[in-house]
Amino acid sequence: MKKIIDYILSIIYLIHFGLTLLVFHVIQIIAFNVFGKKVHKVAVDYLNFFLTFGLYLTGANVILRNLTDLPNDRPIIFVANHQSTFDIPAVIWLLRKYHPRFVSKIELAKGVPSISYNLRKSGAALINRKDGKQAITEIARLGKLIQDEKGSAIIFPEGTRTASGIMKPFVAGGVATLLKRAPDALIVPVAINGTGAFNPKGIFPLKSFSKLSWTVLPGIEPSGKKVEDILEEAKTAIQNILSKE
């Protein structure tokens, strides 16, 4: 019976998901080209609001928590574990005040309604994993951007999704490059839990009545610390949250 419910609710949510991407793709194009970047950002925020809270259509328990006060006068590098494609909408909505730009694989810059358009227009770092020089250049550009704007970036230092919930080692290269160009940045861990189990077999079927949580943790001052030590501290903080849930 539970499997039948999973299939029915998955179909309902995925119809909602697809229609939301299509509708907001048009809205984004109009917002960006007619009204400019600020209105485009608002459109992106509400795209991710509908994607996130649409998860209730699957019976999910969606928990968004911020356990710290974040500064407005310095750059921020959000460091998150990565379990699923479904990690991202809630992160964008939860952190919308800070307008985080993603470090993303370049393949996502084409072919996905709404998402590809936003990646191209938002200033995200679009990296080619087969071209190390290009990847470093893109991440460095993003680092300078958040330093100049006192903005924020978000990176998944595992480098890939881990649906099992068991985190892979955090790779230092991307964060090190961001910090080199944004030396004033605060490192802020974000713990994401439950999304891997939510779609264990790919995008269909989804697991109904899942508990999904996103938690922003206290920041880590990077001054005087090695990047590897910063990431180990961030990983431990994230693991502590995952272990409690």
Image (cartoon, rainbow, N blue to C red):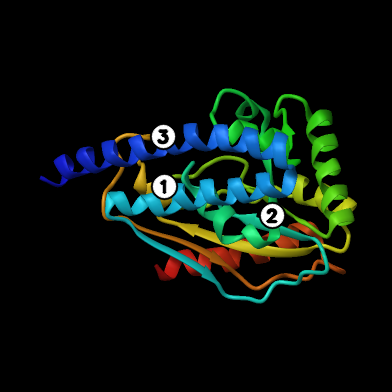
In the image, residue 220 above or below residue 81: below
Q: Which kind of residue does numbered mark 1 sit on?
A: Gly
Q: In front: 216, or 244?
A: 216
- Alpha-carbon distance for marks 3 and 1? 23 Å
Q: Which residue is rendered at x = 74% and y = 44% of the image? A: 37
Q: Which residue is rendered at x = 75% and y = 45% of the image? A: 174
Res 104 → quadrant: top right
Secondary structure beneath dot 3 equals helix
Q: Is residue 139 left or right of residue 39?
A: right
Q: Which residue is mark 2?
A: 99
Disc 1 packing (10 Å; few <14; some 14–19; many ≥20): many
In percent of width and height, residue 157 lies at: 65, 48
Q: In front: 28, or 51?
A: 28
**Farthest residue, direction left:** 1
Disc 3 packing (10 Å; few <14; some 14–19; many ≥20): few
Q: Nearer the viewer, mark 3 or mark 1?
A: 3
In percent of width and height, residue 17 lies at: 41, 39
Choose the circle earlier in sequence order: 3 or 1. Answer: 3
Q: Is residue 144 left or right of residue 212?
A: right
Q: Which residue is mark 3?
A: 19
